[in-house]
Amino acid sequence: MGRVFDALRKSSANSESGASERSPNSSRRGGAPAEAVLPSARQIEEQLLSGSKIMSIPDNAANGSASTAHTADVPDGSALPGGMASRDAGATLGAAGAARAGGFVSIDISPARVEPHLVAISQPRSAYCEQFRSLRTRILQAGERSQMRAFVITSAGIGEGKTLTALNLAWLLAQSEGIRALIIDSDLRHPCAADYLGIDAPVGLAEVLSGQARFEDAIIRVNPAGLYLLPGGGQRDDVAELLGGPTYARLLTDARRMFDYVIIDAPPLGIFTDANVLINRADGALLVVRAGKTRYSAVDKLLEHLPRERVLGVVLNQTDETLESTAYYRHHYYNRTRLPTATTKEVEKEVAAVN
């Protein structure tokens, strides 16, 4: 326990000196003024995609790849399947509501169809969502102070809420003015980000890394927030080889150029080595732990093997502590439905506790 917070204390002392608070909505790449005239999103995407080393499929790719086999079935030339069966829980990429925006497939989702604990979507005015906004503010501050843009969200073990944390954080980042945010589902043994959003997306990162699909064809723009999602795709066993290879490194380089912030949902750090590889390629990392389940000794051991300058903090999930109500949240238009509670605590360095 002591070593965990010693590391966080040292990191906090370095990062907080001379820092000033800024509004999340004022965060812009390179510090450019809001009034500057910039190319359109479509122009940027077309320019970047045309120069990418991973945007095209090799000639010897499988004939049944998602980028070629279903192109004729989807409106506007989408390379994603158009004949998928609709799920009761959500939308499909071939549904009538799907369209292409800025070169990417665009889908509108309903708050009623997403995983209930995605409070950034289902309960945006709740006190629980405010905890994620606090976490978003810390990410934006890290981006401004240290030019951090790519963040890994991992956990000590399974079932600790890392994917929900990553999705809630990415959704709120995408809602910030002037920010283009991408979330990459890199937990290829158990990809579930698309499922939590109620989307059928069988083509994703696994197919891109194996050369069966193009990067731009696998990305989905999720509305109304405008969050960009690269789903995990099909389950794989050779995850370490895929994530540790040069193709993923090039993909991440392209993602940094195309988007302001990249959130990477990584495999559990305490079980697989994949997260270590991703953290070394990203700018920062958040470790999700579960109250009453994760041991301090386990967290301490995990942090010993991580580059301390990249560990931004620990997200404490599923605490028994109840959020204190304030007059602000007693207004009738706020949803007070009780969820498993979590609170944000300051423990030497910002340790965000979220549900």
Image: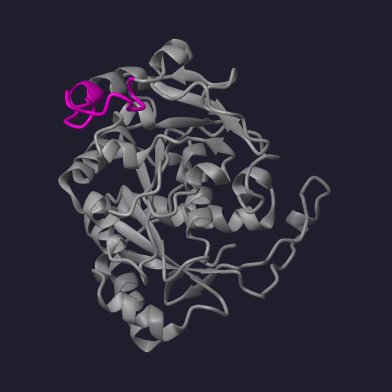
Horizontal placement of 157 versus 96: left or right?
A: left
Q: Is residue 272 visible?
A: yes
Q: Residue at x 25, y 57 (%)?
A: 240
On screen, residue 41 versus residue 121, left or right, reads: left
Q: Is residue 59 part of the magenta span, yes or no?
A: yes
Q: Is residue 40 visible?
A: no
Q: Pick whichever, 158 or 235, lies toward us.
A: 235
In what quadrant of the picture does the C terminus appear? bottom right
Q: Quadrant of the N terminus?
A: bottom left
Color scheme of the displayed model: one colour
| Magenta stretch in the rendered image | 48-68
Q: Main secondary structure of the magenta part?
A: loop
Please determine whether, in this image, residue 328 is positioned above or below residue 226. Answer: below
Q: Position of residue 183 (x, y in %)?
A: 41, 43
Up/down of 86 relative to 288, above or below: above
Which quarter of the figure has residue 89? top right
Q: Residue at x 33, y 76 (%)?
A: 302
215 to 157, vertically: above or below: above
Percent position (x, y) of residue 132? 55, 55
